[in-house]
Amino acid sequence: MRGNLPQREPEFLKFWEEKDIYKAKEKMHAGKEKFVLHDGPPYANGKIHMGTALNKILKDIVIKYKYAQGYDTPYVPGWDTHGMPIEHACLNAMGVDRHTMDALTLRNKCKDYALKWLDDQRTDFKRLGVLGDWDNPYITLKPEFEADQIRVFGAMANKGYIYKGKKTVYWCPHCETALAEAEIEYADQKTPTIYVKLPIVKDNGQRPEAAKGKKAYMLIWTTTPWTIPANVGVTLNPRFEYAWVEYGDEVLFMAKDLVQAVAKDCGLTFGAILGTTMGKDMEYAECEHPFPEYNHRKSLVCLADYVDLETGTGCVHTAPGHGDVDFLTGLQYKLPILCPVDEQGKLTAEAGERFKGMFVFDANIPVLKYLAELGVLLGKKTINHQYAHCWRCKQPIIYRATEQWFASVDGFRQAALNAIAKDVKWIPSWGESRIHNMVADRHDWCISRQRVWGVPIPIFYCEKCGEPLVNEATIDKIAKIFAKEGSNAWWAHSAEELLPEGTKCTKCGHDHFRKESDIMDVWFDSGSTHEAVLKKRPELKYPADMYLEGSDQHRGWFQSSLLTAIAVNGTAPYKTVLTHGYVVDGQGGKMSKSLGNTIPPQDIIKQYGADIVRLWAASSDYKGDIRLSKDILKQLSEVYRKIRNTIRYILGNTSDFNYEKDKVAFADMEELDKWALMHTQLLKKNVTEAYENYDFHVLYHAIHDFCVVEMSSFYLDIIKDRLYASKADDKKRRSAQTAMYEIMKDLVVMLTPVLSFTMEEVYQFMSKPSDAPISVQMLPWPTIHDEYIDKALEEKWDEFIAIRGEITKVLEAARRDKKIGHSLDAKVELHATGHSLDVLKTVEKNLANLLIVSQAEIKEGLEGGETATGLDTLKVTVKPAEGQKCERCWIYSDSVGKNPEHPTLCARCCEVVK
């Protein structure tokens, strides 16, 4: 075995491919119970990073373990290949505006781009040692997948879950499309905040006597000045007490509990509170928009429980065209849904000539200045806060009321919540409450996108009356066409060619139609894999046993898959959901290219090998965030070296051992060998439990400690004399070799899911039966021999190991003090009483060998002992060993020189070399 992983690993990749180990494994376990881990599709738009590497390795570990446990474990990798990032990348590469480009030309460019990166990622995933059906992955742009996605849409539409409506949705002005909640991330943004006075023109008779005759204003607060042109209401909390506050010759209306905070924020001094009013008593009161060009447009006073006292004035600026809760309030109070912003985020003529053509965020200051000019700006400041950004282009987004297609989550929300609680195991357990809250609180799912690269929404509109058309017949026809030609057919064919012959509008009877121009949200693509992959691939099954992705997928793939599966099938698409955290730097900070703290997996593989990346993935508790740094990798490479060297030592010392011919029965073994095998059984129990609980860091520590502490530092160190100095066929040597071989055989299988390359190398070097599988990945999980476990034996050796540790410390001190060189240069006198004496007597016959000294003598009583130990029942005296040093075994003995044929050997070695 050689340690150069970066050079050796490709040889084993070639071996696995040439022997088609994936197919061989499938054939070997054909007919066995399946364990299906369904692959969440990574996005095919760039190099893999440590997050994607972590994810694929964790999946591979689970699958390889489950296979060893006897399951049939097909693994079909997949890729997400539609969506905005790919479309953007292609447009940027070509340097063209998408509005000037033919749709089919752009789509073909996007396809080529996605498939290029798919191949690149596939190569990297294989290099990590991940085994799967790489030649037959599922790809969301494949015609058969797109056809099944259309059928999922059709099934939901047939049940009444799909509708079109004008709603306020997340909108990315940069990408010019609507976004779903799963496509939003938050980042810091500097924002102007303003306090604006709206003249009260109808006060419901609530104005106090002292305020009459003065101009009264309702004071609103907002962090989006650009939305002031869309203001049509002010929302109060019905349970709050509101104050009429004197301010010079004016009266300001705001929440009583916020009066002092507002005065401080604006740097003003208010006068007396002239009276108070409960919020509920101001319902349907009216204010007037402050912009005179709006011709005294009214702002209706509404009520809602979402108004709080955390910030602002308790009087919420309400623009239904630019806010989610604003929109709901607008519907309730029948407010006009004004949205004077176009798809590029520019204010339209509806906002007024003063602001027309301005980008929304650029309009903040002009709006602020105009309000000041009109005398209605009471205060302003700038804050830094978390603001929604598009997760694709990383630019800030807006709310915008537009006509979109939606999936009505209300139609199956409760069924989804029931499945979350009753049908799915969540690992870690907090995943359940996380996704439960997200599903319970989410709005209807906006599934339309104003782009080209994706699966079209299969809806037609009557050219005469505009009535939308979708039914089982239209869905079936489109799905069949897509299965043959792919979704390009939507752009390549006319509506008449795509519709069943003789189709007529159900509303007016007209027979000419136009096609919907929007595509589906990319989460609908990946959310349809349970139908397009799990149900269609014969080697898979529905529901899957496990989905395993990052914790961000509670709002992403876990949720989109759940919602579509519940809507179509009434059941969750998975039995278990396991999530892992994010990869962070060595100090726990976010990794990013701009910070220069990222470490590409390709660089680690080049320096250390893929098995070090795999060991890193297994070494941390991935249920939280996983740290990565050059120091961590260096430490891991040292851990790897220790594990590898332990197995390499065993491999080298069993090279002349044929297990079938030379093994010694457990009952006839040396007691120390029995102890070693007993501890191997205990290790197997711990490791098996850790794999079953997906606690890979537990098995990492358990195996590392076993190799370093119990094997290398104790057992293997002691049996060196037996292995090197005894006759090759000596029963005691064969006993040790039997134990070592069984330990190695078990370690190799337990480590294969993690260190796949290294264990394959060990397996190829191991002596094994002629009918053994050709790859280590095909071996069954080791049997736990409970009959090897002897509590009394364990206690005896645990007690001796503790005493031995004290003796070893004294020997190490003697070595440091130059009293001895190697421990075999020493004779030790053990002055013991009580329990220490009793324990030492049980191993007196082999004591020198167990301590790795030339002679060991037990003396009852502490008198005469030179060095105290950590035990009050033991003292140790270290002396030079008696006799001469045997040049073969290095043990000092009086018998050296007694045999004239071998004057430099001891009597034992003379007998061996005869």
Image (spheres, rainbow, N blue to C red):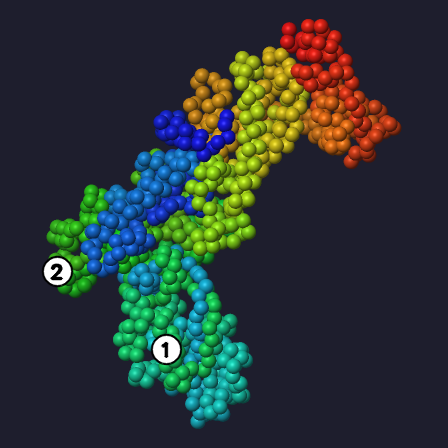
Q: Where does the image place residue 120, in percent across and percent down from the top left?
A: 34, 41
Where does label 1 land, which residue?
367
What is the quadrant of residue 288 in the picture?
bottom left
Q: Kindly state the secondary structure of the residue where label 1 is placed.
A: helix
Choose the circle earlier in sequence order: 2 or 1.
Answer: 1
Q: Amino acid at mark 2?
A: His
Q: Write the residue at 44% across / 68% down.
A: 190
Q: Where does the image place residue 235, in percent across and percent down from the top left?
A: 42, 75
What is the quadrant of residue 337 in the picture?
bottom left
Q: Amino acid at mark 1?
A: Val
Q: Cα distance, mark 2 to mark 1? A: 48 Å
For the image shown, how many numbered marks are present on the structure?
Answer: 2
Q: Is residue 242 left or right of residue 502?
A: right
Q: Residue furthest bottom?
A: 213
Q: Write the residue at 68% across / 8% down.
A: 902
Is residue 427 visible from the viewing direction of this image? Answer: yes
Q: Residue 8, relative to residue 844: is it above or below?
A: below
Q: Write the residue at 44% across / 38% down.
A: 606
Where does label 2 land, which residue?
510
Q: Where does the image place residue 367, in percent across and percent down from the top left?
A: 37, 77
In the image, 855 versus 24, the foreground residue is 855
What is the quadrant of residue 864 in the picture?
top right
Q: Residue 882, relative to residue 524: is it above or below?
A: above
Q: Residue 307, relative to residue 874: is it above or below?
A: below
Query: Quadrant location of the C terminus?
Result: top right
